[in-house]
Image: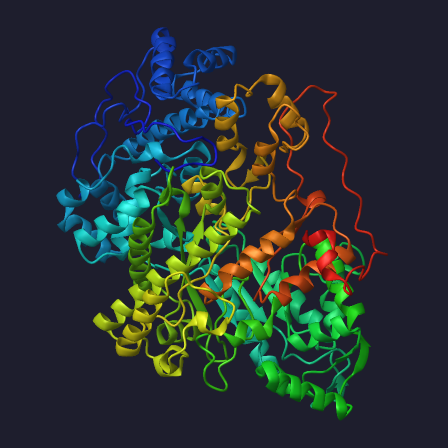
Amino acid sequence: MTQNLTAPPGPEVRSATAPTAEERPEAPRAAGGPVAPERPGTGNGPDTASAADAGERLRAMVAAACAGLAGADPGRVVAAVRAGGGADAGGLRELAIGEAAALVAVEPAYSKVAARLLGAHIADEAAEEGVRTFAGSVAAAHACGLLADGPAAFVRDNADALDGLVDEAGDDRFEYFGLRTLYDRYLLRHPTTRRVLERPQHFLLRVACGLADTVAEAAELYGLLSTLSYLPSSPTLFNSAARRPQLSSCFLLDSPRDELESIYERYAQVARLSKYAGGIGVSWTRIRARGSLIRGTNGHSNGIVPWLRTLDSSVAAVNQGGRRKGAACVYLEPWHADVEEFLELRDNTGEDARRTHNLNLANWVPDEFMRRVEADADWSLFDPKEVPELTDLWGEAFDEAYRRAEAEGRYVRRVPARRLYGRMMRTLAETGNGWMTFKDAANRACNQTAEPGNVVHLSNLCTEILEVTSDGETAVCNLGSVNLAAHTGPSGVEWERLRRTVRTAVRFLDRTIDRGFYPTREAAGANRRWRPVGLGVMGLADVFFKLRLPFDSDEARELSTRIAEEIALAAYGASADLAAELGPLPAYAATRTARGELHPDHFPDAAPTRAAEWDALRARIADVGLRNSLLIAIAPTATIASIAGCYECVEPQVSNLFKRETLSGEFLQINGYLVAELKDLGLWTPAVRDAIKRAGGSVQGVAEIPAELRARYRTAWELPQKALIDMAAGRTPYIDQSHSLNLFMETPTIGKLSSMYAYAWRRGLKTTYYLRSRPATRIAQTTLAAEDSAAPAAPAPDADAVYCSLENPETCEACQ
């Protein structure tokens, strides 16, 4: 059974949902959908129970939900519901769900109880729309205009076989937070009644059918989805088999040309892409700086800020079809003369007319800038109108052109490089934004940059995608993530199973390229020409907890690198197989692999553990090519990890116990691995629970817990960030795109950050993501007695502690 965030490993329980106590009358049949026998343990129609037997039905319902779960006491839930007052049967179940969820901090098994009760509610709600089978679900959704004709016909023609694939016990793999997220945001709903038209297993099989050509293919993909071994990203989950199947996660747009028409065309492209749930990355480096002469009017430019204000409003207005907020990140190179104003865009002080509160910001940093920071040298700022060539250069070519422009005096002004770098760090410390991404590292190893003119100009909204862009090419990526927790047993990672999952995932990610709807022709053309995909992972922290490895141990770092290598080998092999079957990508001749270079070749310090397999792969690629120019990218996975019940991507836990506020409401989460170990030691007591609560989810000050456990259950705030950077650097040779790598600092100072990001650059990282600082992300503590107040807010960043350790970066406490 998949290890989940809110429950320790335990015996698999076969019942998929909590049964009700009576048979329900048959609901109207969905148009075109067969009617299946009633599902055991779940009602299929309106509740007709009298108030007299409501108490007995409540007891039976809760007892069934608690069946087989050690530590779950049905009496405790029932008593709490009764104390809450009278309600009909449906209301009682909703109360029971809430009470069970509230008990998770005491006993993680109640997460499963709440999930089973919610599963029963979902099944009843679907039954009110006549949905009892998968085929009936698809027929009902198609009749409402929600699904495309092709997938609906495929399901209708193979109804019996597909209905037979549904794993009725599959819902029991969900924890409450994950199932609640599915119910609130992902399951198809009737346009008028707003009741769900599919149960969770119907949803997962519908996603599989939207990408499958045969029943066997649907079964293969559904087998991974149902076991939560692999999940595609949210756009694919939202839209697979839909009438307009926008399946892509990320869109990257090059800077508009320095022309009015180009700028407004870019606004329109961003709006169209955002409308269909795409996350946006866009560069703005080509737009002239403030004060630049406009020859056509003999006036002077207002610079990039007014244009970005307009973009900011557009992103806020287009809210991705009402499902989630629109989101974009703007990239700027630090030689742009407006860079200091750019870094102020998210400030909470100053003139609001020069602020953008919806846009994310990222610095696209060349190595030359970082070298000058280290040397304490000056840095020249230019108007792009005067040096348009710099945007399309990287590496030595950029260095030479930049220095030549300096020598010719074409700069607007010069500033100390460390002062500008300190302003970047201040933006990170105060806002978490202004992400540090590295232009030369991104281009140097990218498979798409073999030929002159093919340049990576930016990353995406979450900094894990690195693809070439141009005025006529909008880079696109389709994402999915392997749940590492589901591939780890007591003896370690199940390597062969992991390889099988990766091969299947790559095949269906490749298919999303052809099945997907593209909102712009620039996106469609680029994606079909380059055929990139981004296979990532989630649940790395679960792997370490299962194997009892501290996150910053040498064993954990080595295992992380081995996992990355195995995934890369399997992914490249799968892409080569697809190339042999379907042909290589159209732009294969423009890739580095066509020249015999694989991504690990660019990292001389990489030490592959499977050298013979790499040699065999290299020979096969030389023979058949690759179907995909890029294959690996580690995305944040915040939502799909919650669905799968594992920790996000490759991140450590942020707390052992906290409340999380999401679009689906506020949910309590607890580290079930910790609870299981404390139970084994007889230490999961009210006193220990309250001590963890008072500490905001930390166990470091709880003396009753052995030191070995305290070391293993440190949070992201308590781990040395150098360990996170080193672990990311170890994976980098096997990740041909990049990571969404958050870094954590409870009380950031400019000096600590200066050292940390310089170290990340020196270690060869291509990108970093948010800086998470504790004051901005303090998790609401669970309820304690009034005197147990939350810890005081951490002090503001120390504005005077600038550049404290640039001369001695290895000794900075931020990286130890």
Q: 409 and 312: which one is in front? A: 409
Query: Is residue 559 placed above or below 88 in the rendered structure?
Result: below
Quarter location, residue 380? bottom right
Looking at the image, residue 282 sits to the left or right of residue 385; the answer is left
Query: Is residue 394 placed above or below 135 in the rendered structure?
Result: below
Residue at 76%, 91% (x, y): give it: 407
Q: 207 and 645: which one is in front? A: 645
Query: Which residue occupies the extreme top position in the image?
Result: 52
Query: How many numbered circles are shown?
Result: 0
Residue 519 place in picture, x, y as percent: 42, 67
Instruction: Please say whether residue 139 is visible from this viewpoint.
Output: yes
Residue 255 place in picture, x, y as percent: 58, 76
Which quadrant of the rendered structure holds the N terminus?
top left
Residue at 29%, 61% (x, y): give it: 507
Residue 247 place in picture, x, y as percent: 38, 59
Instruction: Please say whether residue 462 is visible from this viewpoint.
Output: no
Q: 492 and 343: which one is in front? A: 492
Residue at 17%, 51% (x, y): give it: 215
Residue at 27%, 47% (x, y): give it: 222
Looking at the image, residue 182 sits to the left or right of residue 198; the answer is right
Residue 457 place in picture, x, y as percent: 56, 75
